[in-house]
Image (cartoon, helix red, strand yellow):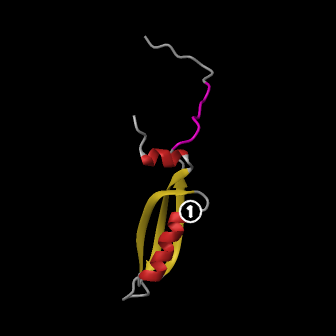
Amino acid sequence: MAVSQEFRRQLEGYSLTTAEVLYHLPDHPHLLQVFVWQQHDIFPLFPHLKRFLAFWQETLDGPLHSVRVMHSRLIKPAELKTISGEFNLH
């Protein structure tokens, strides 16, 4: 049974990364627009996000205002909690 490339990348340290990009509209520079980017990327270097933002600055007309980055590891050690009591139901 073959393992998917996405699962393999998660085992290699990729995590789900979401970037909220605020940028100025080209025709109305005083207005801000939101763009949400989401992809698997490597924390804390974020090479895919950096490549995307470089492409944005070189190619697109809307200048960046700010970028907020969130990430979450999808594969991580299990969290176990011990229970100190027992409840009986009839």
Q: Give the x, y percent position of residue 19.
A: 49, 64
Q: Residue furthest left?
A: 27
Q: How many marks?
A: 1
Measured from the top left, where is residue 70 in percent x and y?
A: 53, 59
Q: Give the secondary structure at mark 1.
A: loop
> Which stretch appears magenta?
75-82
The amino acid beneath tag 1 is Phe
Of residues 79 and 53, the one drawn nearer to the viewer in this rendering: 53
Task: Return the residue nearer the eye: 16 or 33.
Answer: 16
Front residue (pair 67, 12): 12
Above or below — where is 71 with respect to 1? below
At horizontal 46% and vertical 76% (from top left) the residue drawn is 55
Q: Residue at x 47, y 70 (%)?
A: 52
Quadrant placement of the N terminus: top left
Task: Spot the residue most to the front.
Answer: 2
Q: Is residue 29 left or right of residue 13?
A: left
Quick check: 50 above or below 17? below
Q: Quadrant of the C terminus?
A: top left
Is the magenta region chiefly helix, strand or loop?
A: loop
Q: Which residue is mark 1?
A: 46
Residue at the image point whose x is 43% and y is 64% from the top: 37
**Residue 39 at what x, y percent from top left?**
45, 58
Name the residue: 50% across, 49% down.
9
Residue at far top of view? 90
The quadrant holding residue 28 is: bottom left
Residue 14 position (above or below residue 1): below
Q: Residues within 10 Å of mark 1 (few under 14, many from 20)?
A: some
Q: From the viewer's perspective, is 28 left or right of 9?
A: left
- Say if 54 sits above or below 89 in the image: below
